[in-house]
Amino acid sequence: MSVVEHITKAPLDARSLRISPRFAFIGLNFAIALAVFAAFVLSVDHWNAAAVLISLLTLINAIWISGGAATAILGLFVPTKRKIAAPATWQPQGKTAVLITLCGEAPAPVATYLQGFASSLSKADLTRQTEVFVLSDTRGDERIRMEEDALRPLIDAGLVTYRRRQVNTGKKPGNIANWMNAHGERFTYMVVKDADSRMTAGSIKEMIWRMEQKPRLGLLQAGIALIPARTRFGKHQRIASRLLARNFGRGFAAWAGNTANYWGHNAIIRVAAFREAVPLPQLSGTAPLGGAILSHDFVEAAWMRRAGWDIEVAPDIEGSAEDAPQTLGEYFRRDRRWCQGNLQHLRLVGQPGLHWLSRFHFVTGIFSYIAAPIWLLLVALLSTGAVSVSGFAPVLLVASALLAPKICALIDLLPRARTWARRAVILRASLAELVVSALIAPLILLRHAMAVFSILMGRDCGWKSGRQARLHIPSGWVECGVGLLIFTFALTSGIAGAPWLALIYLPLMSAPVLVPSMDRIVS
């Protein structure tokens, strides 16, 4: 058999390469990043201080985007593990608490879900080993009344235990810590869910089974799908998730191994392991970079790993989902809070005793936001003509790295589609996802950059505070103004017609129309 025949006919298996997935990820990451950097260096027409600065910024962000490409490529080479189902007669050894945390969310959908969840627990024969708790930090008399009225039938039927704190010290981590002190001794595991989280009893049963097979497994994070959406933006997120999550999740699980991460919900945690991670440190100083830790999930995972417990992600778990923000405004508000929490990790990444991959998770979370102002600075310098670059090699390599997860997803999905009609649906969905992603990416980039600048200026977003902006500007007009500014600079420097630049300023300029269109409710 020829080499070509072996590659095309043999199953893609990282083990056949005799390279660990973690090493393969690092090698791919730096190889792609260095290719982008080299292409830029070779394309510079005249070197000056601005060119040196841009080349360094390019290298930094090339390493960032190459991580996603490397993860997706690795996902193609990782064999799908065969599930080992629990024996039909198996029963959990210990008790599991299912914790649903509320903080002012609409209670009716939660009550409806819990009613069905109670029934599914009975069908899965988990009723005796599972107890459901609703832990509320809701404020406001009317909201509290609505919440209690919606949950009253479940409480009276003994299907849930409801507790609302009078003082919400420590926000969500404090809420769970309060439960741990009151009830933790009675349980071996706890499943943490937010108000918009959905998990089936079957998925929880499978996760308990996996935890019992690995006594040193402290946390198992399930993959998270998105529930059906109501708006164009929501549908776009769900399509992207359905296309990309399978292959990307497999790659992430492969290189993360037993030092994966925690996403704050839809995970099962060994109570004994969690006790070694809490209480979390209180950062010195005041918010936004001090005070209570907002993105506590990364920290809890790192602290448990430091204590010797394994942290794994299971992208193959089915029956795990959440609701996503349905409008760009909701998405930006959530991202602003996440940005603040992730930038707080700058003060934790150097903590002693952490596993190097835990530090890496902190760094990737930080760069998911810091990358935006770096891109914006690159665009500003290039649009003003501060550096002359010839050729399209750097742009093509950056585009290739950004498109790699989408291309790898198609390579993974198309062979699994049994008919040409299904393949056509996948291709059509992929094309639509690509177009919408290209349109909204500059908007997200700008908002991320604004969030970083806001935090560095000392502005605190709070925790689900509901506070309104002091100055209300109609949706999309901030982005439009920035797009016009970039276009003006590019016009004066003679590069307004550059295709790569047009892909940035045109979506920004169209934001007053694009944002309402994406937020529109569709059937």
Image (cartoon, helix red, strand yellow):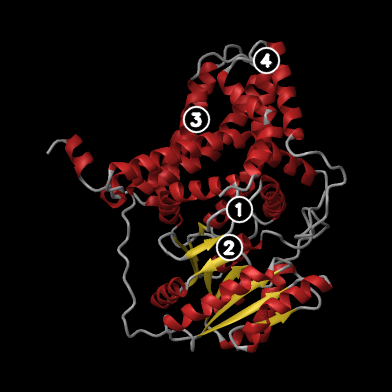
Residue at 40% x, 44% y is 409
Image height check: is 476 above or below 78?
above
User: Dot 2 corresponds to which residue?
Assistant: 302
User: Dot 3 corresponds to which residue?
Assistant: 399
Number of the front mark, 4 or 3: 3
Residue at 62% x, 68% y is 109
Within the image, what quadrant is residue 457 found in?
Answer: top right
Give the residue type at disc 4: Gly
Residue at 35% x, 46% y is 413
Q: Residues within 10 Å of mark 4 (few under 14, many from 20)?
A: some
Residue at 70% x, 68% y is 172
Mark 2 residue element:
helix
User: Dot 1 corresponds to which residue?
Assistant: 362
Mark 1 residue element:
helix
Badge 2 vs badge 1, beta-carbon distance below 8 Å = yes
State how far apart marks 2 and 3 are (Cα).
33 Å
Residue 66 point in image, percent of width and height: 49, 38
Give the residue type at disc 2: Ala
Classify residue 310 as left or right of residue 6: right
State how far apart marks 4 and 1 are (Cα).
35 Å
User: Dot 4 corresponds to which residue?
Assistant: 385
Within the image, what quadrant is residue 196 found in?
Answer: bottom right
Say which label, 2 or 3, has the lower sequence index.
2
